[in-house]
Image: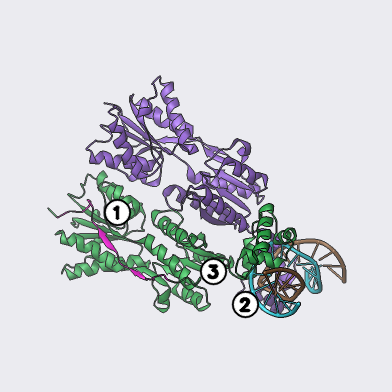
Chain colours: A purple, B green, C cyan, D brown
Amino acid sequence: MATIYQVSELAGVSLATVSRVMNNNARVSDKTKEKVLSAMAELGYQPNAIAQSLASNCSNSVGVLVSELHGPFFGDMMSAIEQTLRSEGKHAIIASGHSNADTEQASIEFLIGRKCDALILHVEAVSDGYLIDLAAKGVSFVLINRYIEQISTHCICLDNQQGGYLATQHVLDLQHAQVAYISGPSWKQDAQARLNGHKLALQDADIAFDSELVFEGDYQQQSGSAGLDALLGTGKAFSAIICANDEMASGVMSRARELNLTIPDQLSIVGFDNIIYARYLYPTLTTVDYPIFQMGKMAANYILAKTYDKSGLVLRDVFVPKLEVRNSSQLLS
Amino acid sequence: MATIYQVSELAGVSLATVSRVMNNNARVSDKTKEKVLSAMAELGYQPNAIAQSLASNCSNSVGVLVSELHGPFFGDMMSAIEQTLRSEGKHAIIASGHSNADTEQASIEFLIGRKCDALILHVEAVSDGYLIDLAAKGVSFVLINRYIEQISTHCICLDNQQGGYLATQHVLDLQHAQVAYISGPSWKQDAQARLNGHKLALQDADIAFDSELVFEGDYQQQSGSAGLDALLGTGKAFSAIICANDEMASGVMSRARELNLTIPDQLSIVGFDNIIYARYLYPTLTTVDYPIFQMGKMAANYILAKTYDKSGLVLRDVFVPKLEVRNSSQLLS
DNA sequence: TTGAAAGCGCTACCAT
DNA sequence: ATGGTAGCGCTTTCAA
């Protein structure tokens, strides 16, 4: 690997001049620039990004922390962020936190240690206090899908409560009066908000909330199937079931098929997230759309604007869910 | 951010000693170690990974290049790699290449520029020559899902041809004699190999290959639907259809449903990859299992063994696909 | 417009 | 067992 020193030697100029043409900020005469450029080409010179970062204290990279590297939700989020960043010559360094406080914290520290200029975090387990401290320390970051009052300007959120409301309102509009609910883990903020929306919709329709009709799942497919069984096991009647995400909804669907329950004739199902596969399930899944791609893009734009001073960007911090009606829900017959 | 210098001052020892306790390699007396550790704690010291990399010429990170950041296939691959690496204290730096030669090359250079100790590449567009050069330059890397004779020791592959063979053999065993095929882009190595396997299976069964029964898709869901239409449009009869991946198979399924073609009664379908959703489609999809998780793990182990000298690892470079029979295929009635 | 030189925060070699 | 110090490859003042 050639270094800047060899380039300067071959071009017959100083280190500083080579550095200048690389960053073409300071004025350099056309002929010296030419010499440097051809020396670089001749040596196949590639700047050492590590050395650049150390010297300039700027790495042109932003750290992205997701819960998991797999799964449609995070995939879209990472894609959106990477595309947006790359178009401005910035790079994403990705790490995962596995919804575990220690891992999340270690990953954040790793990213800071790699001198990321900013962070985009999807964290669930780390405490509010930790994040507030982080902000106080001057680390610049944006939070996706988590709202913390004290650092509200760092947050990009979906109105999850509104989403839960929409889902329930939809089946209520379809005349269903007995509505079951499979929630996410109760310690997760978004799971709480979605369930709250559900309760609110029931309340607005003057229907009493029945906690027996709620099953707490873990956002995995498997817990959808388990949830259906548990709900059926209560002996309580219900004609519609709202799932706090699409994976669990798909679990409910498979289990329903095994039990010879026809969907939507005998049971209407509504999901949440609108992951890519929702439209390929059978029947196609009615769900609440989570605009994660746009939110990922917005997170990147935030960073571009705040950290890299890019102008002309319209920033927005709260996104509204909308219902995507498909074939898994229908009027109560 | 505290630096090593401040730690050494507070602990009343030299830079070198602090460095030693950080990397705890050289012998340091327990009491000095104690002093240093508490100084670190007091200052909330975090080593600067960038400076460490520059000085040591080792970044403890491996670059991972995938075609896309989303999609079940790459998600599993990244997850496997990240888990394996993290368990040894190494980190993954992820980039995407979008199956485009320029982007792939730029990403590889980015990763090299970030001083990754090694690379794990899933590249499709970059030329064999480029990769051979890379190896010659001394960059250490492993290739996933691509075989290049000259650098065969860098390759971790699935026997795609065998996979194509298995898929076709399966429907042949089920008495189907007229088998259509929706392939991936013909310029992709894996697409070619899978199609080859298909042809071989036909040949072994003494069935003439009919190029009209092949449609070239692009591995996207959409092209599955388009493929079914095109195939139907030829007027040729077929009772089974092999798809070079599950996404296209799912496209065929939705389109078949729209056309009131019952699966598997009127049409058997076989996919390839066994992505997580294959088992949640309706009917559940018969497919060729691609052990991408194990392969990702193996790629990481290769690096661990070769670059980081970890011993006791059993290395393997060619994986065998196996058929996962579900409900989308059945005996020709 | 160009060059000289002082770091950036750390590692690793050579002394002691 | 510990300290001194020369780099790692680059950026960025400050002079010329």
Residue A80 position in % (x across, y down) = 51, 50
Task: Name the residue that disc number 1 marks.
Answer: B249
Find numbered disc 2 in the image and state the secondary structure of the residue it sits on: helix
Residue A47 visible in the snapshot = no
Q: In the figure, B177 relative to A75: above or below?
A: below
* Residue A9 left/right relative to B280: right
Find numbered disc 3 in the image and state the secondary structure of the residue it sits on: loop
> Which labelled disc corresponds to residue A43?
2
Residue B233 visible in the snapshot = yes
Dots 1 and 3: beta carbons under 8 Å? no
Task: Name the residue that disc number 3 marks.
Answer: B117
Work out whether mark 1 precedes mark 3 in sequence or the reverse, and give the earlier one.
3
User: Are callouts 2 and 3 both on one chain?
Assistant: no
Circle 1 packing at 10 Å, graded few (<14), some (14-19), many (20+), is: many
* Residue B330 left/right relative to A223: left
* Residue B89 left/right relative to B156: right
Q: What stretch is highlighted in magenta?
A: B312-331
